[in-house]
Amino acid sequence: MSILTIKNLSKSYKKQKILDDISLTIDSPGIWALVGPNGVGKTTFLNVLTNILPADSGSVELVGKPNRDFRIFREVSYLQDNTVLFEYLTGYDHLKYVCDVNKINKARIKEVADYVGMTNYLKKVVGNYSLGMKQHLLLAMAIINKPKLLFLDEPLNGLDPSSAILMRKILIELAENGTTIILSSHNLSEIDRVTKQILFLKDKKIIQINTANYETVYYYLALSHSEKGKLILSENGFLVNEESGKLKIQLKDRSLSNVISILQNHQINIYDIEKEITGSEKLYEELFEL
Amino acid sequence: MKLFLFEMKKIHHTRAFTIFIFLTVLFISGLYIKNYIQQDIIIANKVQQFSEHRSDVFGDIQLYRKQKEEGLLESETEKKLAVASKLHGEINELIQAIQDKKWETELLTEIKVYQSAIVYQEMKGTFEKSKKDMLDTISLNEELLKKGLPKEDMDLSIQPPIFMKKIVSLLLNPFGFLILLLILGTSITREFEEKNIQMVYVLPVSRPYYIMNKFISLVVIGIFWLFIVFFISYLLPYLFTETTENSFSYPLMSMEGNFITSSHYLKEAMIYSLFYMIFSISILIFFGFLIRNTIVTYLLIIFLHIGNFIILTNGFMYQVNPFTYGMVDLGVINDDTQSFFGTSLLFGASIVLMIMSIYMNKRRGIR
């Protein structure tokens, strides 16, 4: 059974075509990122998939059922824009509502609140929430029913770094536990950290690409002797640049342990190592001719 | 049930309804206090009314006497003088009975006064009250004497059934129901405008079920408001008024000319108001889910209610127009026998509107 099947999907809005004859099948767990410029139709695409907006033509099946069947939402969730929340109700009220319609035990509310880190403000009115807190609530609402298919619209919006890390961790865990995740995001570096499967929305079509082939891995090293470290690594054939007081090193065929070994042999201490993977950004530039 | 409770919670949190209930209680209490304070005015008003009649009749008597002195009195005028003198005496008795608060004497004397006044009017004498009104009053007085009840002022009475009737006429009319709808309307339209509805659309809740849930929660709220109206308007007189025994048997004259008891009136009023409230809410659901814009929906509902009110108050009361039954007081008084037809019409119209609402929204997106 396919998790997501789209056949010849088209959608126009005010006589302007937004989605044109899109077909796509996803039949395994994992994370797919939906990427495209502002206003290209990413939210519309997700809204059509979830039947918030009806398609002009074509069909969509989620978890093996037509998307018009409201029962699919026992296994499908959608993390939307935070404006869908009721400002005058508490986070607990929202989660309880979702539990009630899904016939889930209330005990799950605390479990999920703890998991996403919103226990401290669960009983506060949503109108008093920051943007990040609202995103936590939306995530809690989206995962409370342990969905097989999860749509997320800009889930990283308004999140501070620690929340973004937590969100990333949760999504990866969900995917490892069998959930298929489709998230739209502008944050290409964050996308690169969670998935290599990208759905580019361009010219009203979906282009599905695995960015693994476009990946480049960089490491940022904080050293006790940066200048000496840079010289030594360059002499050993590494591509090294200095950025923000750290050495940025690109590994191609060699390993990080090799780098560490060389530095240690020259009595250079390593205080911090950060990893960065790029791939989608380069591809994005090519696709959208930037 | 749980979804229903969630809807109730949303409505409660908007506070508008709580304020509306508070204002309803305040209005009823205020009217009761005003009536309570003005009880002495009832006697003063009656005395003034009959004093004016007495003055008119006395003026005629003086004219006839002058004609008699001048030798101009004809036999016809002689008769008129006799009737006028009798009438004048009866009016004096009546005023005395009113001032002495002897209600039985008052009722009997009033009957005599109007019987004489009818004869006097037929002789072209001056008495500023229509024959129909006088005949109706005679019938009412006879009915009251049969039941052993004093006459009540329909505007200022603080006896429970009459005060409740006054409240029904003031609150359970197109304007009262309109205010209720305007208070409740935002619970539908705002969810579209503020996109809260999108949250519901991606939950395992069918749209027909959601619409019905919304409808039932609004009906329950409406029933609560009706309960407050009837309960408070009964409770205040019950607690603070020296109630007349058998007051719920007080006769009210219908348009057909027969009498209904005030308990029957109130029972009919409760039924009509309940069904009209259900009909009003189904209109709100229909337009709310169709238009999805607060201002346009409100303007349409206001237009419908005020337009119908204008039609109704100009005498165009049609049994087949469901809005006719929004004037609950008139609806009961007009014809107390048509409640089955009226309630069936309202219920049928509600069902049709709900089916249309569900059908139109079944596949429609948020735009």
Image: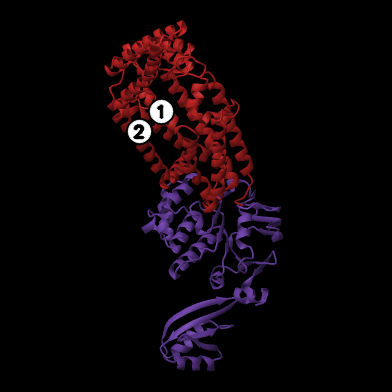
What amino acid type is highlighted by mark number 1?
Lys
Question: Chain A drawn in what color?
Answer: purple
Instruction: Give the number of marks.
Output: 2
Q: Which structural element holds mark 1?
A: helix
The answer to which of A235 and B248 lies nearer the viewer is: B248
Q: Distance between the residues labelled 1 and 2?
A: 10 Å
- The residue singled out by tag 1 in the image is B166
* Secondary structure found at label 2: helix
A8 vs A156, left or right, is right
Instruction: Tell me where residue A147 appears, x and y as whole percent.
Output: 54, 53
Q: Are marks 1 and 2 in contact (CB under 8 Å)?
A: yes
Residue B65 at x, y percent in the picture: 38, 12
Q: Residue furthest left?
A: B100
For the residue pair A211 and A264, the one nearer the viewer reads as A211
Disc 2 marks a residue whose amino acid type is Leu
Q: Position of residue B285 (x, y in %)?
A: 55, 40
Which of the marked residues, 1 or 2, is nearer the chain's N terminus? 2
Please rate how many residues cluster around mark 1, counting C-alpha atoms within 10 Å: few if below 14, some from 14 to 19, many from 20.
many
Q: Which of A42 and B294 lies nearest the eye of the viewer?
A: B294
Picture residue at 44% right of the left edge, 92% below the top:
A266
Disc marking residue B31: 2
Color encoding of the figure? by chain
Residue B346 in view? yes
Is residue A102 visible in the rendered structure shown here? no
Residue B258 against residue B215 in the figure, above or below:
above
Colour of chain B in the image: red
Chain name for mark 1: B
Q: Reply above or below: B276 against A121.
A: above
